[in-house]
Amino acid sequence: MNARKTDGLRSQQGHSCRTYSRGVADLLVVEDDDTIGDALTAGLRAHGHAVSLQRNARGALDAVAGRAFDLVLLDLGLPDLDGVEVCRRIRAAQAGTVIVVLTARSEEMDVVVGLEAGADDYLSKPFRFGELLARVRAHLRRSALVPTTEAAVTSGDLVIDLAARRVTLAGTDVPLRSKEFDLLARLATDQGAAVSRDDLMADVWDAYWYGSTKTLDVHVAAVRRKLARAAGESGGRAPEIVTLRGHGYRLDRPAE
Ligand code: CA
């Protein structure tokens, strides 16, 4: 995919909020199992969503090259390409979409690799449709949320523009994914204060989260890495995300 096309898709991200406020979200289901794929598609359509179904990786990658989706449900076990690689490519094509990985592989490694490849969340098979629907709704609600109490939060040379959902460090862009942004913004809003894992999971992911919170640690690691990279490139001072064992995290302003 060329850079221009990627930019075009990125610029459509803003549409997702408006679309969903009308109650219709654009979903992509990628699932090679006919029974599951058809059931998911029918169920989600019955709940008012626009759903495209693709049964292999090639179809999915063509679909995301063509238009922006609000949310992608991605089966990791596809016949033509490794699901983690598909996840990586979907993320590269659409920075703003929510990717929920569906995995029959219960090994923690696959989940972590999937999250590192750009997934926002995962659901282990078998799952109940009601469970999936609740998760989809929570993600769509959250991606439509625009924190508007303040225009920007700063910490050292870091500027988090809440309205534009853009982060810069000493003028250098810090390219964060959607959940990474939400996580950093949440910590920065309470900087200097401890924020518990439960609060972070509830505020950034889903109030009814019941699964592993490994997702949180993977996202924290990614934000730390990106802040460090931006600090190295710009020479700016980045805040530090401190791990509070058995509790959560705290964002500390950089030392003067
Ligand atoms: Ca499969």
Image (cartoon, rainbow, N blue to C red):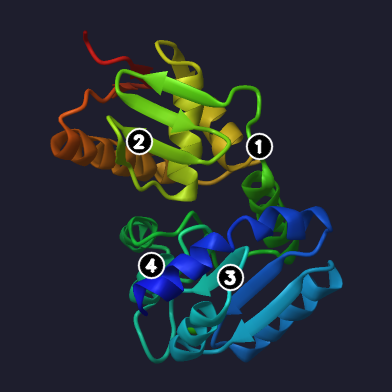
Is residue 101 visible to us here?
A: no
Residue at 45% in and 86% down: 57
* Foreground disc of the pair 2, 4: 2
* Foreground disc of the pair 1, 2: 2
Q: Mark 1 falls on what kind of element?
A: loop
Q: Earlier in the sequence, mark 4 or mark 1?
A: 4
Q: CA distance from mark 4 to mark 3?
A: 12 Å
> For mark 3, what is the residue?
68
Disc sitting over residue 184 in the figure: none
* Foreground disc of the pair 3, 2: 2
Q: CA distance from mark 1 to mark 2?
A: 29 Å
* Foreground disc of the pair 1, 3: 3
Q: Nearer the viewer, residue 57 or 154?
A: 154
Q: Earlier in the sequence, mark 1 or mark 3?
A: 3
Q: Earlier in the sequence, mark 4 or mark 3?
A: 3
> Amino acid type of disc 1?
Ala
Q: Residues within 10 Å of mark 2 (few under 14, many from 20)?
A: many
Q: CA distance from mark 3 to mark 2?
A: 25 Å
Q: Nearer the viewer, residue 162 or 32?
A: 162
Q: Earlier in the sequence, mark 3 or mark 2?
A: 3
Q: CA distance from mark 4 to mark 1?
A: 28 Å
Q: Residues within 10 Å of mark 4 (few under 14, many from 20)?
A: some
Residue at 36% in and 68% down: 88
* Disc 3 residue: CB within 8 Å of ligand 1: no
> Amino acid type of disc 4?
Ala
> For mark 4, what is the residue?
92
> For mark 1, what is the residue?
207
> For mark 2, what is the residue?
168
> Amino acid type of disc 3?
Ala
**Looking at the rendering, in which quadrant would you find the C terminus?**
top left
Q: Earlier in the sequence, mark 2 or mark 4?
A: 4
